[in-house]
Amino acid sequence: MSRRKPIAISCGEPAGIGPETAYRAWDALKDEDTFIWIGDPRHLPNGANFLEINAASDAAAVSARALPVLARDFGSVAVAGVPDPKHARGVIASIAEAVDLVQRGIADAVCTAPIHKAALIDGADFTYPGHTEYLAALAGTDRVVMMLACDVLRVVPTTIHIPLADVATQLTASLLTDTILITHAALRRDFGLASPRIAVAGLNPHAGEAGNMGGEEIEMITPVLDALRAQGMDITGPMSADTMFHAAARQTYDVAICMYHDQALIPIKTLNFSGGVNVTLGLPFVRTSPDHGTAFDIAGRDMADTTSMIAALRMARTMANGRDV
């Protein structure tokens, strides 16, 4: 088969399961795609079959027989389950290098392994809430959208990592409009959906029940949806969140726009806990990530489930191919 430009995989937290799942995912997919891993090879599993390369352009010739590695010295080995702030700058540099490769057209997509924000803060004064915000800064993009996707559901939380008490004040017409527009454009460009069907949840129980359980649906959400429908978008809502995720309802839309973090993530993690993928929409490049954390409790024990990393790499390729059309 012809080898494509690689998907660049950042190392993530060395003491977590990121290096292990990246390696196992490469081993599962090496015959169907090309990858490159950026990090300290001492953090890969013992006995890993890898090959250090000098340039990302060498990955295609290597990836089918060994994991291509752009080796970076983090200064010390990692202790499984024990994050070391001394590794923070290397972890951050791995993400930045992966982005640089895709921005320069050397790689087709970025897949990021999980990070441990406390270690990044302690070791490098990391000022971003997480991957998504750092990637947006690297891309020079003001607003991006987080989508979680699996084989049976795509969800987008409009507000993300904020206290529930703050959702109603931070949920604005501008934010909701931008979230839907970015999602709509990404479904067309990256997923090949010519006319995406978008379902939008209400904020309050029963979508406010005609104002009896809250006025956000009447005062803000419905006017936003009406304005976007007038532009020709296929939008349903605001819907009662407790009735929009059963099997029959999911057949009526391509993505569910939710108002806050748990409203979106509880249904997808219930439906497919191991196979979800975190996708950043609105970037000028493709970025995916497994939908799990560092899992320090099982790191280094050969127990990590690679399902989400494999799904993230496959989705990165699908999206990259969509942008090539």
Image (spheres, grey):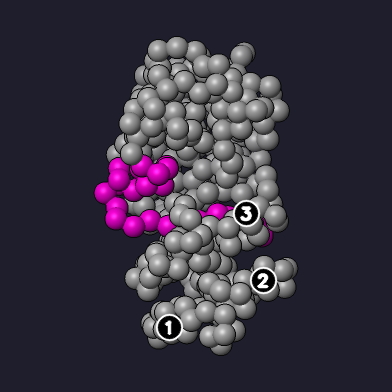
Outermost right residue = 247
Which kind of residue does numbered mark 3 sit on?
A: Cys
Q: Give the number of the mark in front: 2 or 3.
A: 2
Residue 109 % position (x, y) = 43, 42
Which mark is nearer the camera, 1 or 2? Answer: 1
Identify whether 13 is placed above or below 216.
above
Q: Residue at x 49, y 45 (%)?
A: 288
User: Was residue 316 drawn as part of the magenta stretch in this picture?
Assistant: no
| Res. 176 in view | yes
Identify whether 24 is placed above or below 191: above
* Residue under pointer 2: 242
**What's the magenta region?**
128-152
Q: CA distance from mark 1 to mark 2?
A: 21 Å
Which residue matches tag 3? 150
Residue 152 x %, y %? 66, 60
Quick one: SS at disc 3? loop
**SS for tag 2?**
helix
Q: Counting residues from the N terminus, which is met first, the one under dot 2 or under dot 3?
A: 3
Whether the residues at callouts 1 and 3 have beta carbons within 8 Å, the answer is no
- Report the amino acid beneath label 1: Glu
The residue closer to the viewer here, 200 or 275, is 200
Give me the residue at 57% from left, 80% from top. 213
Q: At which x and y percent is residue 96?
A: 34, 34
Report, in whole angstroms, how far the alpha carbon at label 2 lies from the one at label 3: 19 Å
Residue at label 1?
219
Using the rendered image of the protein, determine whether residue 7 is visible from the camera's viewpoint: no
